[in-house]
Image (spheres, grey):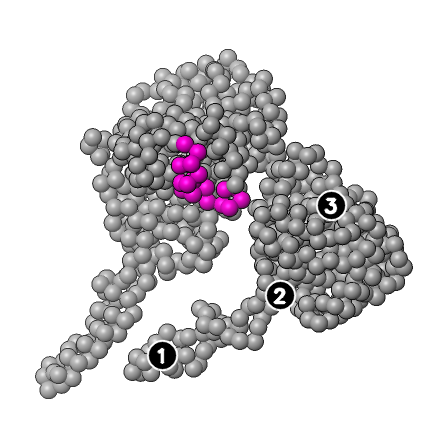
């Protein structure tokens, strides 16, 4: 349908013989058919061309006249597209439908260039100017590359992709889970605040005043992160600690981070460094058991005994990042997680393998802990990290 | 140029905008011209700092009509965009009438209660907010800035007003614009707007400009900046945009700020020390600052 057709070109040419009364001109039958067909071709290509968009397009073409191909191009782009991602398909159809030289588009022969644009996003040394059509293509390519990167398993990334992923962490926006406190605060909505209302009346010597209202204060809950840095988790440890760093920066007073492996290490202070790379270096110096064995049960026991029962875990959202591999008896791990859950408001277990196809929870550790976990989610990609943040932020309600 | 002649054609509009120091390319001029001719709102999306808000200001200036600006925010409601009654003044009016009635207790009646109620809902007690003001003062330019920050409900409300160009006030009746105002909506794409709103607008995405165009923009808006300085600033900013994986690439607004800051400090050239001292005008995130400092050393020493 979008192939260049001499008949179509002839009809477009015939349309251009419209009289010069551009302001009030009526499209000829042939021109209307051509333009309407073009709008329907855009819809077929996936643009959200609705009936009123099509009518808007025809009215816009009537205004600009059909003498200028560029004017028709811009009239269509204003009326038939709704986002920068729509520009590339629009350009393809426009050039196919109206023929002539490429105007603002990447022609089919230039398809390999799209890959180059995408590759340049991971290669800082190769610049592509965000100018005009190239910029439009860059926006689309940027969206495509970032979208692809968001869903890729961080364990399998190339060094270049890993560097691109590190930059994405700055854009994550953790929100702390909240709970309703006992105190009240003035508000536009909520229960009537009788005392404040009467005092306002008195201040106005009995004149009617606005009804004052109040609501209960929402306070942030503590979030405790336990990150497994044992050998089986080494491919994910860097990304998970960057995620933890992002969460510490968002809520420094309410977020605590520990690493677990052969022993438990408190790394919240190290992750308080603002720069993520320096924070990870500081954490690396503090943690003595990188990529070592796994003693989750014993580490959790230390956490419960030294921090959890003393208050850190009470009413908190506890997030464990681990694949569940356990060197010691899984019963100990199950017992300790039961203890954590009896203290915490919500327990979330993040398993990087959870997001893989065909995964089933069969490791002894996972089997032991599943009865004591409120949420069991994946943790292998940037999109999964966003889900982690969403689950943590949403853990505000009453426990099921 | 005569204001009414600005909308003869897209090219005439681009020339008139240039007269206000706003450089519009062919696409933007055509879309803006169509928005005026078809009496449709214009929805501008683009990176922050690419001149979306400035276009509305330039349009108001070249037409010699008022610019009415509505800044959207999360939680904005219809009463903050439309109108409200001046409750304290109505109470004061009631008090004055009561006092006059008491003074005339031995004299004539002050009038019926229906007249009094009608007085209370007179236009002089009506507080017109941006949207209602735009309908009353048309022709004008109404700028709805950063509409993506408003709630969904507000978007639906805007949809209704922009379709009919009329607002009904229950106590007064319907207020209709004599001529529809030219409406410009801007969005930073912090969230996706509903298609229902987009469908009623003409849509345009504004890109960062290329080097020569950005240089022309700096020349037009900051004539006091030396040519060599302007070119160096624009070249550096273009390279920052292209080469760095920055959290927030600098927009044209930041380029102008940076050039203005350098001119205010009395510099006519850009060197690594001066750039490092003033780059806060262009770089606003701590994550970007160190990266830019390294890039500046590389760019300015070759």
Q: Which residue is mark 1?
A: A200
Q: Is residue B34 visible?
A: no
Q: Main secondary structure of the magenta part?
A: helix
Residue A83, image x, y percentages: 50, 37
Q: Nearer the viewer, residue B142 or A275?
A: A275
Q: Which dot marks residue A236?
A: 3
Q: Work out whether B267 lies above or below A178.
A: above
Q: Work out whether B99 lies above or below B81.
A: below
Residue B68, image x, y percentages: 30, 49
Q: Earlier in the sequence, mark 2 or mark 3?
A: 2
For disc 3, the chain is A
Q: Which residue is mark 2?
A: A221
Q: Is residue A289 visible?
A: yes
* Distance from the alpha carbon under mark 3 to that under mark 1: 58 Å
Is label 2 or label 1 in front? Answer: 2
Q: Residues within 10 Å of mark 1 (few under 14, many from 20)?
A: some
Q: Residue furthest right?
A: A329
Q: Which residues are magenta?
A: B271-289
């Amino acid at each position: 349908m979008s192939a260049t057709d001499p008949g179509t070109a002839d009809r477009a040419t015939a349309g251009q013989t419209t009289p010069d009364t551009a302001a009030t001109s009526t499209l000829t039958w042939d021109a209307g058919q051509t333009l309407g067909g073009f709008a329907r071709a855009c819809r077929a290509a996936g643009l959200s061309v609705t009936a009123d968009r099509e009518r808007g397009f025809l009215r816009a073409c009537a205004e600009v006249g059909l003498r200028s191909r560029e004017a028709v191009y811009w009239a269509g782009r204003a009326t038939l597209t709704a986002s920068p991602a729509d520009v590339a398909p629009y350009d393809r159809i426009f050039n196919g439908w109206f023929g002539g030289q490429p105007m603002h588009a990447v022609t089919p022969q230039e398809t390999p260039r799209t890959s180059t644009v995408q590759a340049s996003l991971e290669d800082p040394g190769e610049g592509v100017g965000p100018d005009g059509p190239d910029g439009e293509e860059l926006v689309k390519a940027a969206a495509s590359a970032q979208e692809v990167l968001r869903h890729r398993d961080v364990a399998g990334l190339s060094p270049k992709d890993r560097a691109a992923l590190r930059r994405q962490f700055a854009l994550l926006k953790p929100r702390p889970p909240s709970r309703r406190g006992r105190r009240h605060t003035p508000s536009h909505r909520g229960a009537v605040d009788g005392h404040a209302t009467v005092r306002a009346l008195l201040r106005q010597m009995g004149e009617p005043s606005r009804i004052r209202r109040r609501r209960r204060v929402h306070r942030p809950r503590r979030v405790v992160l336990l990150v497994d840095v044992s050998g089986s988790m080494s491919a994910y440890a860097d990304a998970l600690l960057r995620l933890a760093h992002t969460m510490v920066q968002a809520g420094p007073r309410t977020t605590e981070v520990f690493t677990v492996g052969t022993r438990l290490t408190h790394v919240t202070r190290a992750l308080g460094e603002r720069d993520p790379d320096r924070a990870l270096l500081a954490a690396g110096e503090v943690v003595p058991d990188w990529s070592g064995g796994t003693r989750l049960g014993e580490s959790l026991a230390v956490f419960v005994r030294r921090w959890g029962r003393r208050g850190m875990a009470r009413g908190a959202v506890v997030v464990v990042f681990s694949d569940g591999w356990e060197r010691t008896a899984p019963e100990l791990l199950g017992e300790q997680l039961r203890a954590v859950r009896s203290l915490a408001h919500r327990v979330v277990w993040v398993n990087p393998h959870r997001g893989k196809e065909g995964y089933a929870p069969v490791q002894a550790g996972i089997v032991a802990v599943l009865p004591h976990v409120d949420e069991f989610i994946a943790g292998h990609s940037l999109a999964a990290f966003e889900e982690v943040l969403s689950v943590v932020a949403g853990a505000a309600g009453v426990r099921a | 140029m005569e204001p009414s002649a600005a909308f003869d054609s897209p090219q005439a509009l681009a020339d008139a905008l240039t007269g206000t120091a706003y450089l519009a390319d062919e696409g933007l001029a055509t879309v803006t011209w169509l928005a005026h001719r078809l009496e449709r709102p214009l929805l501008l999306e683009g990176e922050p700092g690419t001149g979306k808000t400035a276009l509305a200001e330039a349009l108001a200036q070249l037409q010699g009509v008022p610019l009415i600006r509505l800044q959207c925010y999360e939680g904005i409601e219809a009463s903050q965009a439309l109108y409200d009654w001046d409750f304290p003044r109505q109470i004061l009016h009631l008090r004055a009438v009561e006092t006059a009635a008491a003074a005339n207790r031995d004299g004539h009646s002050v009038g019926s209660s229906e007249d009094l109620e009608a007085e209370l809902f007179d236009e002089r007690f009506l507080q017109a907010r941006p949207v209602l003001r735009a309908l009353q003062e048309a022709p004008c330019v109404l700028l709805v800035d950063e509409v993506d920050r408003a709630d969904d409900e507000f978007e639906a409300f805007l949809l209704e007003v922009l379709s009919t160009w009329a607002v009904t006030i229950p106590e007064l009746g319907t207020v209709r614009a004599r001529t529809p105002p030219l409406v410009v909506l801007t969005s930073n794409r912090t969230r996706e707007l509903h298609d229902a709103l987009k469908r009623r607008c003409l849509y345009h995405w504004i890109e960062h400009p290329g080097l020569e165009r950005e240089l022309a923009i700096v020349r037009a808006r900051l004539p006091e900046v030396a040519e060599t300085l302007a070119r160096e600033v624009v070249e550096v900013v273009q390279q920052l945009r292209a080469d760095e994986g920055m959290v927030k690439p600098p927009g044209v607004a930041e380029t102008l700020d940076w050039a203005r800051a350098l001119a205010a400090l009395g510099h006519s050239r850009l060197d690594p020390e001066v750039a490092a001292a003033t780059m806060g005008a262009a770089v606003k995130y701590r994550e970007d600052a160190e990266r830019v400092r390294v890039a500046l050393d590389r760019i300015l020493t070759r």
